[in-house]
Image (cartoon, rainbow, N blue to C red):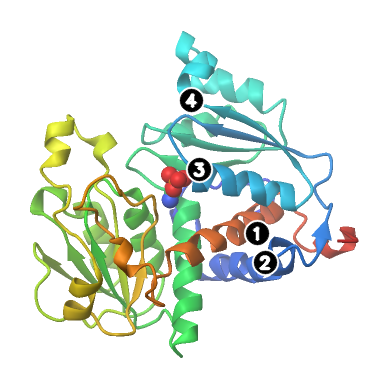
């Protein structure tokens, strides 16, 4: 895969070699993210950070990653603050904003919208989540986290057993992560969700076509010998009504008791976040916060590294970052 000048729209663009390249560059970013080193390699460059849907992690970590490489960030948040609200097309918006930026990151509620936007852009566009479709940078940071966590336990991604729980229909992070995992060997998926929120057939076909196995369960029963438990939130913003979303909230909780009963003592717990903490029936309980296998905040930290790597690669500066080191 050629990174420099390319849009990053889908995990379908990646193969194992390009994933390893991203992870190698992400590893090189550790001292910069830890503020042990400082670089100005992207001094003078501008990131257009366009978020037309709510976000904390993706938006801020894109901005942080660009700042850590020495660049500046211009943000547009919310549809109502942009001329899209006056009927401007994604194509025109892209033509205009790509004249103001060296690279653009974008989140939008409609599937396929970021790809449509990229057709009008004169600079690389990175997909920060398009509707229920894809969230490629989340999938890359999830995979990077999985690799690091498994390495800690002496394992690797080939042969992985992952349990994915919750809203597998609308959860774009599990769609993108599943597709990336298909590039590895002998992956076992346990897919736990209400049947109305089951993993889409297209993803199940991709898993089968790649020669991997999956089992589907509508309940958390028995003992899952999973290496990773990847929990998701009910994506209530994608349901027809709040009442419909409420039918599923709290259905697949994970707390310390359920974890101890159904998972191995070394199973790593992941969640793309945010977790819904508004009710007692939240999907990932606070009583897991002190569990050393809870990797959710290691995921968010890794997001900065992976996004720094993607900026460096798409702007073609990955090999000269340290040439622009400055005193800390
Ligand atoms: N994981 C994720 O996409 O979080 P945000 O919605 O806060 O960006």
Q: Which residue is mark 2?
A: 25
Residue carrying label 1: 309
Which residue appears at 21% of the width and 55% of the height?
A: 199
* First in residue order: circle 4 vs circle 1: 4
N-terminal of the pair, mark 2 or mark 4, is 2
Q: CA distance from mark 2 to mark 4?
A: 32 Å
Instruction: State the residue lying farthest toward the bottom.
Output: 154
Q: Is residue 154 above or below residue 165?
A: below
Which residue is farthest top? 86
The tag on residue 78 is: 4
The percent position of residue 194, horizontal first and vertical second, equals 11, 54
Task: Report the residue at 57% width, 65% height from top.
Answer: 18
- Which comes before the other along the chain, label 1 or label 3? 3
Q: How many marks?
A: 4
* Residue to which mark 3 is pinned: 127
Which of 189/316 is in front? 189
Q: Which class describes the residues within 10 Å of circle 3: few (<14), some (14-19), or many (20+)?
A: many
Label 2 close to label 1 by CB (< 8 Å): yes
Residue 8 appears left or right of 250: right
- Per the image, label 3 sits on a secondary structure element best described as strand
Q: Of marks 4 and 3, which one's residue comes earlier in the chain? A: 4
């Amino acid at each position: 895969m050629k990174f420099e000048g390319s849009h990053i729209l889908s995990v379908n663009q990646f193969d194992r070699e390009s994933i390893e390249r991203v992870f190698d560059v992400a590893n090189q970013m550790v001292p910069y993210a830890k503020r042990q080193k400082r670089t100005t390699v992207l001094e003078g460059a501008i990131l257009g950070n366009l978020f037309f849907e709510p976000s904390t992690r993706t938006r801020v970590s894109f901005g942080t990653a660009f700042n850590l490489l020495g660049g500046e960030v211009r943000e547009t948040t919310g549809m109502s603050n942009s001329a899209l609200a006056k009927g401007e097309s994604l194509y025109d918006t892209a033509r205009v904003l790509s004249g103001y930026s060296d690279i653009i990151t974008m989140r939008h509620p409609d599937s396929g919208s970021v790809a449509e936007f990229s057709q009008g852009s004169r600079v690389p566009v990175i997909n920060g989540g398009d509707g229920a479709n894809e969230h490629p940078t989340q999938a890359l940071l999830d995979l990077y986290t999985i690799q690091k966590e498994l390495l800690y336990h002496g394992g690797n991604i080939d042969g992985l057993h992952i349990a994915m729980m919750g809203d597998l229909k609308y959860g774009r992070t599990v769609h993108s992560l599943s597709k990336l995992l298909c590039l590895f060997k002998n992956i076992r998926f346990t897919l736990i969700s209400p049947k109305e929120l089951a993993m889409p057939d297209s993803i199940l076909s991709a898993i089968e076509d790649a020669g991997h196995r999956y089992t589907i369960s509508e309940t958390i029963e028995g003992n899952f010998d999973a290496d990773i438990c990847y929990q998701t939130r009910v994506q209530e913003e994608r349901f027809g009504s709040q009442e419909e979303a409420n039918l599923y909230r709290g259905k697949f909780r994970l707390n310390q008791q359920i974890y101890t009963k159904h998972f191995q003592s070394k199973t790593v717990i992941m969640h793309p976040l945010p977790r819904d903490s508004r009710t007692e029936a939240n999907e990932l309980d606070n009583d897991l916060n002190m569990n050393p296998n809870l990797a959710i905040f290691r995921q968010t930290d890794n997001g900065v590294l992976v996004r720094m790597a993607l900026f460096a690669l798409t702007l073609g500066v990955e090999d000269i970052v340290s040439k622009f080191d400055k005193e800390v």
